[in-house]
Image: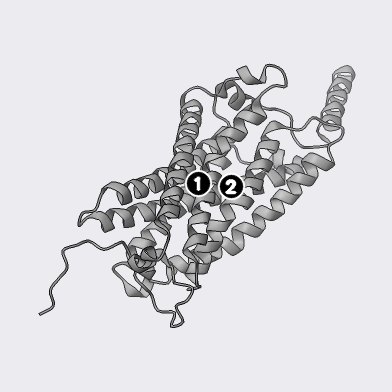
Amino acid sequence: MTQLSTTPSLPFKYNVTGFHREDNSSGSPIDVEEVFSELSMTLIFIGMILSLIISTLGLVGNGIVIWLLSFHIQKNPITTYILNLAAADFGVLISMVSIILCTFFWHTDAFFTWVLALSICFISAYTCSQYLLTAISIERCLSVIFPIWYRCHRPNFLSVIICTLIWTMSALLGGTFILTMYVDMFSRIPQIINFINFIVCTPIVISCTVILFIRVCCSLHRRRRGKFYVVLLFALLFYLIFGVPLSAIISLVSIEATISIYVAISSLICAFVNSSINPLIYFLIGRKKVCRSRTPLKVALQRVCDDKTDCRDNEKPLSHSNQKMIALLNLTS
C-alpha cells in the first residue's frame, strides 16, 4: 500500500498554472515544486515584495477613488464607469495580495483550496476590468465620431446597464472555472473564453486608442481637450503596455503553449501596475496648472468627472445656430 505524504506540496499542476518547463520535450505537465526548485528564490522573493508594494499603493489609490465616488461626488455616466473600473482593479489587487500572503504564511491542508478560489476571483476581476475598459473606449469613440447621434440616442442608464452586464459576465466566467473542476465536458470552456477575450478586446482597445489619439491630440486645435478623454487615452495606453501581456499569457496557456516562469511573473507584475496606476492618472490630469502640489485627489477627480468640454468639433457651431434659431422664432412669434 502506498504511503501518503503528509507534507503539503506546492500548488497545482498544469490545469491551474498552465506552466511548462522550456526544456520539457514531452510537453507533459510537471509539478510546480520541481519548477520552483530550479528557480532563483531570491528573484521570486524580490518579485513578490515588489508586487506587494505596488499592490498596496494600488489598493490605497483605488480605495480612495471608490470612497470619493460613492459618497462625495455627484453621480453621472463618467463616475459610474470610473467607480466600476476602480472596483474591478481593487478586486484584482486584493486577490493577488491574498495569494502572495497565503504563500508566505499559510501552509495547511486548505492552502490549495483557498489559492484556487482566490485565483478564480483574480481571473474574474481581471476580465471585468478588461471588459470595462473596452466598453468605455467604445462608447467614448462613438461620442467623438458620431457626436449628434450619440447625444440624441444614448439611453440615460446605458453606463449602469453595461456595468451590470459586464459584472454578470465576469461572474459567469468564474462559475465556469468552478464547473470545470466537477464536469470534464466543460474543461475547455474557460480556455476558449480567455482566448476569445484576447483576440477580440485587444484589437478593439488598440483601434479606440488610435481614434482617441487622433481626435484628442491632432484634430482639436480649435477646442480645449476634455480631461476625461485625456484620462481615458492614458488609461488605454497603459493597459496596452502593462495589461495586455498578462492577457496574452493567459491566451497562450489556453492553447497549451510553453510559457517561461520568468515571463509569467513579469506579466503579473505588469498587471499589478496596470491595476494601480489609474488613480495616479486621475490626480495628475485633474490638477490645475497652478498650485499643482496642493490639489487634493477629490478636487482632481471632480474635475475629471465633471469636465464639460467634449471632443466634438461641431458642438459650438451647433449650439450657436440653435440659439439663433430660437431667437428668430421668438421674434417672429
Q: Position of residue 61 (x, y in %)?
A: 50, 32
Res. 85 in view: yes
Q: Earlier in the sequence, mark 2 or mark 1?
A: 2
Nearest to the observer: residue 20 or residue 312 = 20
> Taking 178 as reference, is 320 left or right?
right
Q: 33 or 37: nearer the eye? A: 37
Question: What residue sits 85% from the left and 41% below the top?
Answer: 219
Q: Which residue is mark 2?
A: 133
Q: Amino acid at mark 1?
A: Phe
Q: Amino acid at mark 2?
A: Leu
Where does residue 135 sit, x and y in percent of width and height? 60, 48
Neighbour tally class for label 1: few under 14, some 14-19, many 20 plus, Cα within 10 Å = many
In x, y percent, where is residue 311? 76, 37
Residue picked out by circle 1: 272
Front one among 160 and 268: 268
The residue sitting at 65% across, 53% down in the picture is 205
What residue do we see at 77% from left, 40% from top?
216
Disc number placed over residue 20 in the picture, else none: none
